[in-house]
Image: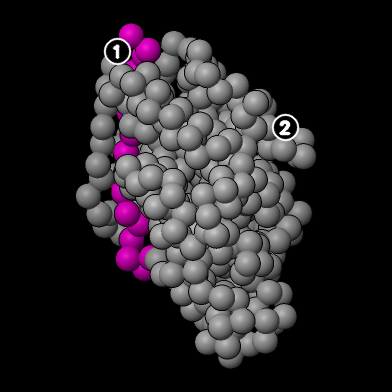
Amino acid sequence: MSVAAVRIRRGHGADGSWETALAVPHVRLRPGVISYRGMRLDLVRARARLEAPIGAATLLLGFEGSVRISRAGRPTATLGSVFCGPTTTAALGEHSGRLAGVEVLLMPWAAFTLFGTAQHELADRVVDPDELPHTLGSRWAGLGELAAALAALPTWVARFGLLDDVLTRWSAAGTPSSERVVRAWSELVRTRGAVPVPRLADEVGWSVRQLENRFREQIGLGPKAAARVLRLQRARRLLASGRSQAETAAVCGFYDQAHLSGEFRAMTGCTPGQFMGARVSAAVARSGMPAGDRMTGEATSLLITPGHSADFSKTGRAR
């Protein structure tokens, strides 16, 4: 398959060298496969990043190095390749400074099709894809080999082309997601989590109970929890664009600013002010490196910089 234009950025400075590559998957895979992001970091010191919940699933195919991932109430995991299903809580990822791989961002219903696992089993978890109990077989048996094959290719264009080929085959062989789930999810995304669940169920011709059950299977979260994630995702984007907390709360449908702050704490472990203030501090410290946000134009992550006033613990909570 031909690959759409790949945007590559490189840099070198006192902190080391880095390279990122962004591409849109083949049209046959869209909208289920959202994006590809390649990275190669060779930094002089370790890095830690707080990853906020987003309305997507993430597959990292690692070439070099590993990531140590901590989440409140879950065991810490150190993995070379990672699958992260839908989540309502933040995770803290740490690496030594040397890291390379490709990150594939997926609609949750596409992850259900590609990997054949009920998504509620993966919600709020990070797992080694090769160890998923219900996805053993030819598609997943070769995942480690796929990561090695990607690493051996000479260019990002070739790597993304291989991913297009493999994911197209997996998608064709996988369990189709429900058209009504896809419609309901698309409406939640379109309204940024604002549509009431009973109306959403009525629009796709299911009872609320049926919608909840199918969402848990194919999205990983119930529709109400998914709406919370999408609403806070919009709030982070607005705050990052310069909107005030009061205005953001009103636009996004929170009862008031205190409600926004409470949701921020519940899902990121910090207040809106701490999150946005730390992003500003991190932007200065990055010295030209990209922000590393998983979704283009979104405030999805926070680089934890040495000496920042907020002390983020291993569970991603500020104290």
Coloring basis for residues = one colour
In this rendering, would 280 be left or right of 121?
left
Please determine whether, in this image, residue 38 is positioned above or below residue 116: above
In this rendered view, identify the residue nearer to me: 292 or 239. Answer: 239
Q: Is residue 19 magenta?
A: yes
Highlighted range, magenta: 13-30
Amino acid of disc 1: Gly
Tally the numbered discs: 2
Q: Is residue 244 magenta?
A: no
Q: Which residue is mark 2?
A: 76
Location of residue 114 by image quarter: bottom right
In this rendered view, identify the residue nearer to me: 132 or 292. Answer: 292
Amino acid of disc 2: Thr
Q: Position of residue 139 (x, y in %)?
A: 60, 57
Please determine whether, in this image, residue 53 is positioned above or below residue 195: above
Q: Is residue 176 visible?
A: no
Q: Which residue is mark 1?
A: 13
Q: Residue at x 60, y 73 (%)?
A: 175
Q: Position of residue 216 (x, y in %)?
A: 68, 67
Element at label 2:
strand
Circle 2 Cα neighbour tier, 10 Å, few/some/many (<14 / 14–19 / ≥20): some
Circle 1 Cα neighbour tier, 10 Å, few/some/many (<14 / 14–19 / ≥20): few
Q: Position of residue 185 (x, y in %)?
A: 51, 71
Please determine whether, in this image, residue 262 is positioned above or below residue 70: below
Q: Residue at x 43, y 29 (%)?
A: 277
Q: Residue at x 68, y 37 (%)?
A: 71
- Looking at the rendered image, the quarter that the C terminus falls into is top right
Location of residue 204 by image quarter: bottom right
In this rendering, would 224 be left or right of 15?
right
